[in-house]
């Protein structure tokens, strides 16, 4: 579980916008990992298991089925 925390912390960092994920993908979306009891960012919530959050932020649309919250629609529009 610690590795998911490290990855999500990176994906929500300014450094990730320099090449890991497209510049505005995570911007304005609050990620809430239900299995880590931790959150990143701000804005409409993207709620679900850490693995699904990482996959969705990386552009894997299959992970959207495991997520909830208003951030899902926002992220869908960016992928």
Image (tube, rainbow, N blue to C red):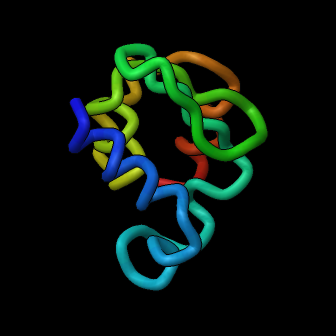
Q: Which quadrant holds residue 39?
A: top right
Q: Position of residue 23 (x, y in %)?
A: 56, 74
Q: Which quadrant holds residue 50?
A: top left
Q: Residue at x 62, y 66 (%)?
A: 24
Q: Which quadrant holds residue 4?
A: top left
Q: Position of residue 67 (x, y in %)?
A: 45, 20
- Residue 20 shown left or right of residue 42 in the figure: left
32 lies above or below 31: above
- Residue at the far right: name it: 43
Q: Position of residue 65 (x, y in %)?
A: 37, 19
- Residue at the far bottom: name it: 18
- Residue at the far front: name it: 2
Q: Residue at x 32, y 52 (%)?
A: 7
- Residue 37 shown left or right of residue 30 in the figure: left
Q: The N terminus appears in which quarter of the rendering?
A: top left
Q: Residue at x 67, y 43 (%)?
A: 29
Q: Nearer the viewer, residue 20 or 10?
A: 10
- Residue 38 shown left or right of residue 69 in the figure: left
Number of numbered discs: 0
12 lies above or below 45: below
Q: Residue at x 22, y 43 (%)?
A: 3
- Residue 45 shown left or right of residue 66 in the figure: right
64 lies above or below 79: above
């Amino acid at each position: 579980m610690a590795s998911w925390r490290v990855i999500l912390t990176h994906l929500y960092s300014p450094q990730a916008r320099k090449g890991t994920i497209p510049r505005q993908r995570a911007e304005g979306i609050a990620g809430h990992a239900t299995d880590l009891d931790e959150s990143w960012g701000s804005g409409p919530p993207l709620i679900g298991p850490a693995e699904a959050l990482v996959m969705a932020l990386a552009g894997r649309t299959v992970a959207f089925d495991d997520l909830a919250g208003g951030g899902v629609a926002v992220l869908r529009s960016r992928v």
